[in-house]
């Protein structure tokens, strides 16, 4: 077989490969960043950063997390690894743009907490979280730690990290001074006990 005939046979295969590569790249292009840990691809697939739990958009740090994720991935083609379906149809994944590990960058910036979902990078993501927290970066700094601004509003609404249960604490409750209000988690100060109850908080057991 001469070289010209071989070339003619190879060209269609090469063009077909280019077509499928481009099609796949187009499908994995990010067209919307929903919040700090969720985005949508051109294919219609909605992706959540595996192991990463950024603040809801309407909470402290939510806008900053969404903006940071946008600068990293919007309009770009992403590579998804270790994909896993969620109950509500979203896909969780480790996300890369080139050599950049997007999940880790969000954690490095202090814009999320771990969700501890099992994956090969869980230890790395957890360490990034601790580094950011110890350095008071992002949501772990003054940005999202509420302080008393009204002397009449001193009831602390705290959310237990392990159980997600909501409790409110008066100044004479035990551990009151140890509680830090992190608004990125939905914690806040209340002016009255009724406000706390209406928001779904219950009185802490250490209150008398």
Image (tube, grey):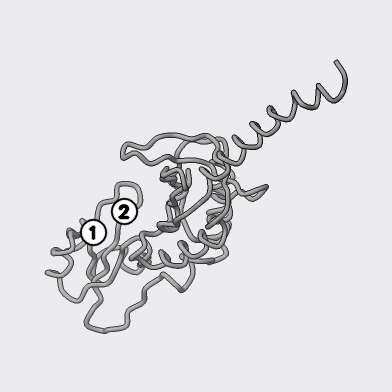
* The image quarter in which residue 73 lies: bottom right
In the depicted structure, whether residue 147 falls above or below residue 103: below
Which residue is located at x 40 percent, y 57 percent?
34
- Distance Cα–Cα, label 2 vs label 1: 8 Å
Q: Locate the C terminus and report the quarter of the image it occupies.
A: bottom left
Name the side, left or right, on which 100 lies relative to 42.
right
Residue bearing the label numbered 2:
160
User: Does 25 sit left or right of 142 as displayed?
Assistant: right
Residue at image point 59% right, 45% down: 124
Residue 78 coordinates in the image, percent (x, y): 57, 46
Residue nearest the viewer, comparing 15 with 126: 15
| Residue 25 or residue 133, whichever sits in front | 25
Question: In percent of the image, x 52 and y 63: which residue is there?
Answer: 68
Which residue is farthest top? 1
Q: Which residue is mark 1?
A: 167
Mark linked to residue 16? none
Residue 167, quarter of the rendered image: bottom left
- For marks 2 and 1, the one nearer the N-term is 2
Q: Nearer the viewer, residue 204 or 70?
A: 70
Label 2 neighbour load within 10 Å: few <14, some 14-19, many 20+:
few
- Looking at the rendered structure, the secondary structure element under dot 1 is strand
Would you place residue 97 above or below residue 176 in this image? above
Give yes or no for contact between labels 2 and 1 (Cβ–Cβ under 8 Å): yes
Q: How many marks?
A: 2
Quarter of the figure with residue 155: bottom left
Question: Residue 133: where, in percent of width, then height?
Answer: 52, 60
Q: Helix, strand or loop at disc 2?
A: loop
């Amino acid at each position: 077989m001469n070289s010209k005939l071989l070339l003619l046979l190879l060209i269609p295969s090469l063009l077909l490969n280019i077509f499928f590569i481009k099609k796949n790249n187009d499908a994995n292009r990010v067209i919307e960043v929903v919040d700090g840990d969720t985005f949508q691809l051109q294919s219609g697939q909605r992706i959540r950063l595996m192991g990463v739990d950024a603040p809801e958009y309407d909470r402290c740090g939510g806008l900053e997390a969404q903006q940071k994720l946008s600068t990293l991935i919007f309009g770009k083609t992403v590579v998804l690894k270790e994909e896993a379906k969620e109950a509500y149809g979203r896909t969780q994944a480790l996300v890369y743009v080139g050599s950049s590990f997007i999940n880790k960058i969000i954690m490095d910036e202090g814009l999320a907490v771990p969700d501890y979902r099992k994956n090969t990078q869980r230890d790395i993501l957890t360490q990034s979280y601790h580094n950011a927290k110890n350095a008071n970066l992002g949501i772990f700094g003054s940005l999202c730690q509420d302080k008393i601004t009204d002397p009449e509003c001193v009831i602390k609404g705290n959310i237990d990290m392990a159980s997600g249960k909501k409790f409110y604490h008066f100044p004479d409750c035990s551990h009151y001074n140890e509680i830090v209000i992190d608004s990125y988690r939905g914690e806040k100060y209340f002016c009255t006990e009724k406000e706390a109850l209406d928001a779904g908080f219950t009185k802490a057991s250490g209150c008398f």
